[in-house]
Image: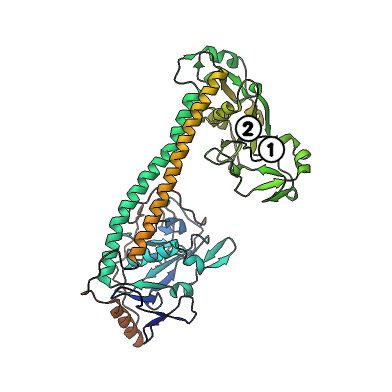
Amino acid sequence: MTTDSGTVPEPGGSGAEVDVTGGLPAGWVRATLGELGVEVQPGFASGKHNRDGTGILHLRPMNVTRNGMLDTLDARYVVDDSDRRVERGDVLFNNTNSPALVGKTAWVDSVEPLAFSNHMTRLRGPEGLDGKFLAAQLHHMWSTGYFKSILNNHVNQASVSRKALLDTVIVVPPLAEQHRIVAKLDDLLAHVEAGEAAVEAASEKQQPLMDSILDRCILGLRHESSNESLADIQARSSKKINYRTLRALPVGWVWRVAQDVCSSIVCGSTPQASLMHADAGEIPFLKVYNISKRGFIDFTVRPTFVDRGTHEKNLKRSKVLPGDVLTNIVGPPLGKTAVVPVDHSEWNINQAIVAFRAGPDISPEWLRFVLQSPYVIGLLTRTARATAGQFNIALSTCRELPIPVPPRNVQDALCEELEISAEQLAGLHENVRSLNGEALELRNALMHAAFTGTLVPQDPDDEPASVLLDRIRAQRAFGAKPDRRKRAPRKTSPAAPQTSGRPVPAGTQEALPL
């Protein structure tokens, strides 16, 4: 509680004291959530969710975005008769999640009451504390790492205790200024989010553009086609691939079966766990997660090694060399493709990956682009068999995969063209990443300005926030609870809002699978 000297306890219950007004604009104070009389209410667990709208929408950690908004596009419902609900004006705090995500906070803007899980905490402030201002400040504290510094770590997750939350110190301007800050943030962040949406739209077009370029080059779509290109392969048979449905290629090109143009097509195997070593070793051992969606090997992700003896004996059939083209045959997703880099002279692969090595009729570069072509890799992935939610492609089918083969000089010219396109799109990708970083910096700068008193001007006629604290102290002295904001009468049959507040940019929100 605020003392007569104008100080509040440090968060965490240390007993140290903090100056209530020191360094703050006129009329502002510092106070803990507990001192402000903020009501803290956890939700309830439910293992019986449904997506058909039966019951009431049940908010979970994934419904609070990294931008501090409610997103209920992935709505789950529960049948529940309790009165544990969040309503418009409440603040929803994510109390349990992975350590990086504990503390995400959103203001609730739902016409109807909604249920919420036990991994969420409902906060209701007193009259004089704007819920939207509180939510924005707590979310900013999450984004700058405050909650990560006070959480409790558990197995595979972390949490913030009720006491630590109530001991959290926030700044409180006069109520009229809180309203001005919230309105200004809404206006400025709407512009930021419009820019983010434009960047996201540009980013989403990159891969389809590269896919289109790949197919145009790999299939020779800019040239007149000839049925002669189909004659040889249509005389062959395959158990899984119908060669008679292939597109005709330009004059001088032919379809060939992969095993006829590749000197080697092998899949890997997985040794005993005791023969694999994390982080360091002699021979790098690739797994599916090391093949990135953008078409390169990323060995920084959980690197695994095997020793030379295991490589030469147990795994001798799955050795791969720089320039070999890898495709995963177990998924989802299927068909991630990348070239073995030159970082090591030899590598090895697990059983979920197939390695193609170019023969004399095709260049390794051409084989790489062929196996990245959506048309060609699609012929392979459509043969997948599903078993217990997992898709598998047979090694024998990989050997029967049709490969378009133009003359070598045409291969070289098209590979050069594709390299230039890939470099240009990689540059665009880096520009998009840079713009995303700038947007994050701008968000943080706006939030910093909001909670240090520089976003909007102060008005000396505003009632100081210290009056709010005095009123709460007086109410507590008489044993009364702080005045709560007035809430709309409760309704039944809640409808799920898709989003709350400003538009939410597209993207999956990481959270516990609750």
| Disc 2: CA contacts within 10 A as few (<14), some (14-19) or many (>=20) | many
Q: Which residue is pictured at 30% across the width and 66% down the height? A: 454
Local secondary structure at mark 2: loop
Q: Is residue 111 left or right of residue 345?
A: left
Residue beneath disc 1? 345
Question: In the rendered structure, which amino acid carries the disc numbered 1?
Answer: Ser
Position of residue 68 measured from the top left corner of the image (x, y, whole percent): 39, 59
Question: In the rendered structure, which amino acid carries the disc numbered 2?
Answer: Gly
Image: 506 above or below 492: above
Q: Which residue is pictured at 71% across the width and 36% down the height? A: 319
Position of residue 456 measured from the top left corner of the image (x, y, whole percent): 27, 65
Depth order, front residue of 218/126: 218
Q: Residue 95 carries which label?
A: none
Image: 60 above or below 152: above
Residue beneath disc 2? 323
| Disc 1: CA contacts within 10 A as few (<14), some (14-19) or many (>=20) | few
Position of residue 240 measured from the top left corner of the image (x, y, whole percent): 60, 26
- Name, please, the residue furthest toward the left: 461
Res. 380 visible in picture: yes
Q: Which residue is pictured at 62% across the width and 24% down the height? A: 258
Local secondary structure at mark 1: loop
Tell me the quadrant of the picture where the N terminus can be found. bottom left
Res. 393 visible in picture: no
Which numbered disc, 2 or 1, marks the residue that appears first in the sequence? 2
Position of residue 168 measured from the top left corner of the image (x, y, whole percent): 43, 73
Image: 90 above or below 126: above
Give the CA separation, mark 2 to mark 1. Answer: 10 Å
